[in-house]
């Protein structure tokens, strides 16, 4: 591999943050598609093809588009430069000199244009469902970071108007493409996985509390809002709220006789709330350790729901 190609690959991997993508997007795909591999009415080759399409999509949109636009915006506002930079603080491709801010911005907006063009082509060739899923993903990435929307900087808007729609659509994408319908188990799995994703993002924002407050404009995440309104200890409040919603969702699973799935949900929610209750929100290392345990929990829970559907 030539030196420029190696540098490009290395920069792409740093920008992509494979651990975060794997613990969220990849396992969300598994949770929604694995049951169809066991369905004799659905050819395995079709399930595999759809899984690969979704995987490529999540690598492009979550791994590259979302991170490039978010890193560019957060660099310009100044929050990433002040971040403790463990799991938070972006990919650090700008701070480490791997890419200039201008180059990263051009890459992010250029990729947006390419993906929008792909959406138009999909519509022209009659692949409406794929186009819809792609457009939802683009919306999530662009609306989260790009002005004038920049929902990441508005309490509750970033997770509900940007992150949740894209992760929920990813969870439903496989079954929608393969069956043309949305069975209850698929909606349930997508709901839980998307909710856990936004809950984890709230924990992810805790170490950046001071950096986000110092940004220009202020990055007023739900975490910053809760800490400013109720005190620093309540920075964990949005995540606790979302984990509580996840735990209560076990009632829905039990109602539809998914008892094993319900048990897994209760265990995941209870553990997550326990870890959050114990962590010192002023200690970035402690919060990062909590984040890592939650990433593992997200993986286990998504796989659990996929297997016990």
Image (spheres, grey):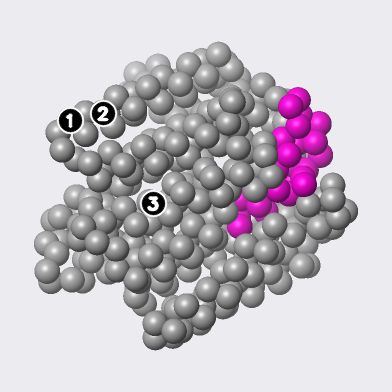
Which residue is under mark 1? 124
Quadrant location of residue 261?
bottom left
SS label for mark 3 = helix
Query: Which residue lies under the disc numbered 3?
Result: 169
x then y, percent, for residue 188:
41, 68
Please state, as top left, top right, bottom left or bottom right, where the C terminus lies in the image: bottom left
Query: Which residue is the site of mark 2?
Result: 120
Pointer 3: residues within 10 angstroms few (<14), some, or many (20+)? many
The magenta span reads 199-225
CB atoms at circles 1 and 2 under 8 Å apart?
A: yes
Image coordinates of residue 28 in percent, x first then y, are 40, 57
Quadrant of res 56: top left
* Residue located 69% across and 64% down the image: 240
Task: Please report whichever mark, 3 or 2, sits nearer to the chain's N-terminal start.
Answer: 2
The answer to whether residue 27 is left or right of residue 128 is: right
Vertical position of residue 55 compared to residue 69: above or below? below
Q: Secondary structure at mark 1?
A: helix
Q: Is residue 216 left or right of residue 76?
A: right
**Residue 119 position (above or below residue 24):** above
- Please give the name of the residue rendered at 70% of the width and 48% of the height, measured from the top-left corner: 222
Q: Is residue 166 magenta?
A: no
Give left or right: position of 56 versus 128: right
Image height of 6 relative to 168, above or below: above
Instruction: State the SS at label 2.
Output: helix
């Amino acid at each position: 591999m030539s030196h420029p190609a190696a540098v490009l690959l290395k920069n792409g991997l740093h920008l992509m943050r494979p651990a975060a993508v794997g613990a969220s997007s990849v396992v969300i795909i598994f949770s929604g598609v694995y049951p169809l591999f066991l369905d004799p009415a659905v050819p395995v080759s079709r399930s595999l093809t759809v899984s690969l399409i979704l995987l490529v999509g999540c690598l492009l949109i979550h791994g590259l588009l979302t991170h490039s636009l978010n890193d560019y915006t957060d660099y310009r506002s100044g929050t990433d430069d002040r971040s403790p930079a463990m799991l938070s603080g972006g990919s650090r491709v700008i701070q480490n000199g791997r890419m200039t801010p201008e180059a990263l911005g051009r890459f992010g907006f250029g990729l947006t244009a390419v993906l929008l063009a792909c959406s138009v082509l999909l519509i022209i060739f009659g692949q409406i469902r794929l186009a819809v899923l792609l457009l939802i993903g683009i919306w999530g990435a662009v609306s989260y970071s790009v002005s004038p929307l920049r929902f990441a900087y508005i309490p509750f808007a970033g997770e509900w108007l940007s992150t949740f729609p894209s992760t929920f659509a990813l969870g439903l994408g496989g079954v929608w493409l393969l069956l043309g319908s949305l069975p209850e188990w698929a909606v349930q799995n997508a709901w839980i996985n998307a909710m856990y994703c936004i809950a984890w993002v709230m924990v992810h924002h805790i170490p950046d509390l001071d950096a986000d407050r110092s940004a220009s404009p202020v990055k007023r995440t739900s975490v910053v809002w809760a800490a400013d309104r109720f005190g620093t200890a309540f920075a964990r409040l949005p995540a606790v709220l979302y984990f509580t919603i996840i735990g209560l969702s076990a009632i829905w699973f039990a109602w539809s006789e998914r008892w094993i799935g319900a048990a897994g949900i209760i265990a995941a929610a209870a553990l997550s709330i326990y870890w959050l209750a114990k962590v010192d929100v002023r200690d970035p290392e402690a919060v990062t350790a909590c984040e890592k345990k939650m990433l593992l929990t997200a993986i286990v829970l998504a796989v659990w729901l996929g297997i016990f559907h």
